[in-house]
Image (tube, rainbow, N blue to C red):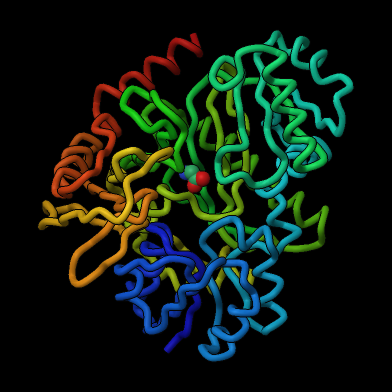
Amino acid sequence: MKRILIVGNGAREHVLAETLKHSPQECSLAVFAKASNPALKALATEYHVGNSLSDFEALRTFVGHFNPDFAVIGPENPLADGIVDFLAAMNVPSVGPNQILAQLESSKSFARDLLTKYEIPGNPEFKVFTGAEGIKEFMNKLGGEYVVKADSLKGGKGVKLSGEHLDSIEDGFTYAMECIESDGRVVVEEKFVGEEFSLICFSDGKTIVPCPMAQDHKRAFEGDTGPNTGGMGTYSDANHLLPFLTQDDFDAAMHINQRVVDALKEETGQAFIGFLYGGFIAVKNGVRLIEYNARFGDPEAMNMLSLLKSDFIEICEAMIHGRLEQLNIEFERKATVLKYVVPEGYPDNSVKNEQIGLHPLPEGAKAYFASVDEREGHLYLLGSRAVAMVGHGETLEEAEQIAQAAAETISGPVFFRKDIGTAELIQKRIDHMAKIRN
Ligand code: GLY
């Protein structure tokens, strides 16, 4: 019986746990969490709720008691804080990069500089600033179309774009100076026009194996309006590409991911073990890198892992031991659509501690719990994204109908984006890409 530690408590960790449990190998799971998650708890033999996922003293006690064979790390913050190094010192290997390698996500300038140094394609025109000098000039050089990226992790709120969050060069400069004040540096870069997509790979530091590609929807409301969120939903297609991308786009993104894993090895002498999440954008003449994450995506993990046919415990062990090239990893050839059901008021003024009702799901649907708690047999909203509803189908149309029907089964003060995965929205993406490329 394998003993596996999972760090985190959202829907991503729910699907990680479910996929480990689906392995033909038996396992017992312990979850190190900072909030309750009744579905994850039901899969675990031990569930610790503390104040922080980076409370390493509490982790030491939990790990000492559970004695895991390995750990799977969900979110970015503990990775950035060195949880993998801490666990390694306790002889627990992890699926997740150590602190140095996790800089790929936790320092935007580290990622950009790595691509430049190793001549990897995909970077925009960019500059890293540590003081005021030259910032406005560079923004002007970019034609006033720029992106300002806080260097460190900011929970998805560190990136601001001209024309969307910043109305002038002066606004951009003010935000860039705030970033310098907080992190000592800031990245200012060219703004891309195109369609974004995620290409997440299993990595053992040498070999990378792609998961089906997916497109996330950041904005809270239909038609891509409203504030940015952690992601309101995602879709993936039965052929594992996306309807607005070509095989060449996939090959270009895979090439960048492989070169980055190789460059990390050369730069640090260490193997990137875990989930390498390339956030890309297809543009007029190819593919560019928006940013890297050093972990599985949320929501993407639910689209991808719910399709995995191969033994996930074997994949995790292969990542840890550098044996990925020996595996034949397969995903079902089905389309998926995911709609996150979130509290009214999300993301800025979410209702909390209100009861929601979960009713029987349509066939082909799966529910993954995120920010919900169970009290006396009832589910309550905790304030962030609540339940991810995933539909599987032979086509995107079928998967969308199932996800939509599943999301509608939740009663209470919640909402979700009805447009995610619809034929209309996907056609818009295809038309947008065609217009840009012609
Ligand atoms: N899909 C967005 C994220 O995982 O950060």
Q: Is residue 78 above or below residue 49?
A: above
Percent position of residue 394, x then y: 21, 43
Percent position of residue 103, x then y: 72, 52
Left or right of 162? Residue 296 is left
Say which quadrant the N terminus sits in: bottom left
Give the quadrant of residue 129. top right
Percent position of residue 379, x then y: 23, 61
How many labels, in total? 0
Give the quadrant of residue 151. top right
Give the quadrant of residue 160. top right
Residue 234 visible (yes or no): no
Q: Is residue 169 above or below residue 209?
A: above
Residue 227 visible (yes or no): yes
Percent position of residue 289, x then y: 62, 34
Q: Is residue 238 above or below residue 421?
A: below
Residue 303 versus residue 143: which sits nearer the camera?
143
Q: Residue at x 35, y 69 (%)?
A: 40
Left or right of 426? Residue 437 is right
Q: Is residue 64 above or below residue 380?
A: below
Q: Residue at x 26, y 67 (%)?
A: 374
Left or right of 231? Residue 340 is left
Q: Residue at x 46, y 43 (%)?
A: 230
Residue 308 versus residue 341: which sits nearer the camera?
341
Q: Residue at x 28, y 45 (%)?
A: 341
